[in-house]
Amino acid sequence: MAYSAQTNKAVLNRYMDLPLDSKVMCEYLWIDGTGEGVRSKCRTLDFEPKHPKECPIWNYDGSSTYQAEGSNSDMYLHPVAIFRDPFRKDPINWFFVKSYKLQQKPAETNRRKLCNEVMEQAKEKKPWFGIVQEYTLLDTDGHPFGWPKNGFPGPQGPYYCGVGANKVYGRDIIEAHYRSCLYAGVKIAGCNAEVMPAQWEFQVGPCEGIDMGDHLWVGRYLLHRVAEDFGVVVTLDPKPIEGDWNGAGAHCNYSTLPMREEGGIKYIEDAIEKLSKHHVRHIKAYDPKEGKDNERRLTGFHETSSIHDFSAGVANRGASIRIPRNVAEDKMGYLEDRRPSSNCDPYSVTEVIVRTTCLD
């Protein structure tokens, strides 16, 4: 039997209420060398920064985050966005940062820099994104949260958007995460229970340009932190349970200004045509292992397309690209790329979509 190293939060509260006077605790967040994990550490400031440029550049040990050798381990953190901290409350701030090996050389997993350059080139098109982040809750022993320890729950069917203790597991975590996102300033749009029991999703957006990656990464960090308080683990594995169970994706809704205006369906169809010619490029960009993780998920079953083929269709959740039915009827709106894996880097996803549809 696995035991959680959970502590008593009621004891912590007496310390969290202590006044800080003029001091501000600032948490620096960054993406580690796996391209999937978020790391953080805290720093005291004597002022409350209002803009990322006011925040000091800081450093960390890259040899402990899979990003550097011990003989040359210093990495630098450059703040790029500020969010409110729901765990320590005001006047606390979070910094979401990009990491550098040297002051001007981005780390290999700092894909924000290239993404930002592409978004700047396409800014007149006003690219909007919304990402549906699916994830699975696990016990600390790695077993799906709420599942029988010596068996399986009933087949998929009653769990999607379900209600009841025999259909959904971990709702307290989802509620706490939702409110934490709203407090922090993350553009969370909604949440719901997913098809596989113990699987959930939250939606972030609409976000323009580089904001999509910033807000989704902070939303993920919040999810891990909230689950930590409950003694539960979150996995973004795109196929956490083999067999007749749905995998987990990060479906990306995308539009440009011309797509959102009257007659935009023409521009949506043009974008789909361009996407069809670069399927392999996108598959490589849609998970951290350049398609190896998605290979387990994109089988053509369980509401997925085949990883080997490009397809598109109206209201078709088995296609690479879905055109929502209301978009087809209104002849304007957005498209949904269903290929990105749940553990994708949203900077890579949004960058390659804009590059293919707007710049190529």
Image: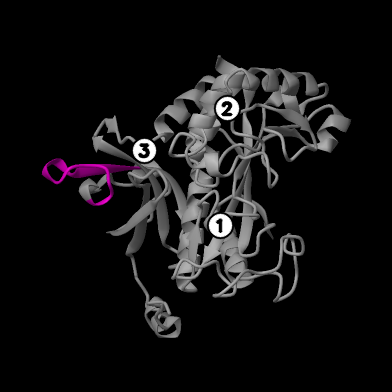
Rounded to the nearest whole Å, what is the CA distance between mark 1 and mark 2? 29 Å
N-terminal-most mark, 1 or 2:
1
Name the amino acid, label 2.
Ile
How many labels, in total?
3
**In this picture, residue 105 sits left or right of residue 259:** left
Let me know if residue 148 is in the magenta part.
no
Quote the CA–CA distance across marks 1 and 3. Answer: 27 Å
Is 270 above or below relative to 327? above
Picture coordinates of residue 88, whole percent (x, y): 43, 68
* Whether residue 277 is situated above or below residue 200 in the rendered picture: above
Residue that numbered label 1 is attached to: 241
Task: Check disc 1: other Cα within 10 Å, few if <14, some if 14-19, many if 20+.
Answer: some
Dot 3 crowding, Cα within 10 Å, few <14, some 14–19, many 20+? some
Q: Sequence-wise, which precedes: disc 2 or disc 3?
A: 3
Q: Which mark is on residue 229?
A: none
Instruction: Please give the range of residues in magenta.
Output: 64-78
Of 91 and 358, nearer the camera is: 358
Label 2's element?
Answer: helix
What amino acid is found at the position of numbered circle 3 in the picture? Answer: Thr
**Mark 2, residue position:** 353
Dot label at residue 109: 3
Amino acid carrying mark 1 in the image? Ile
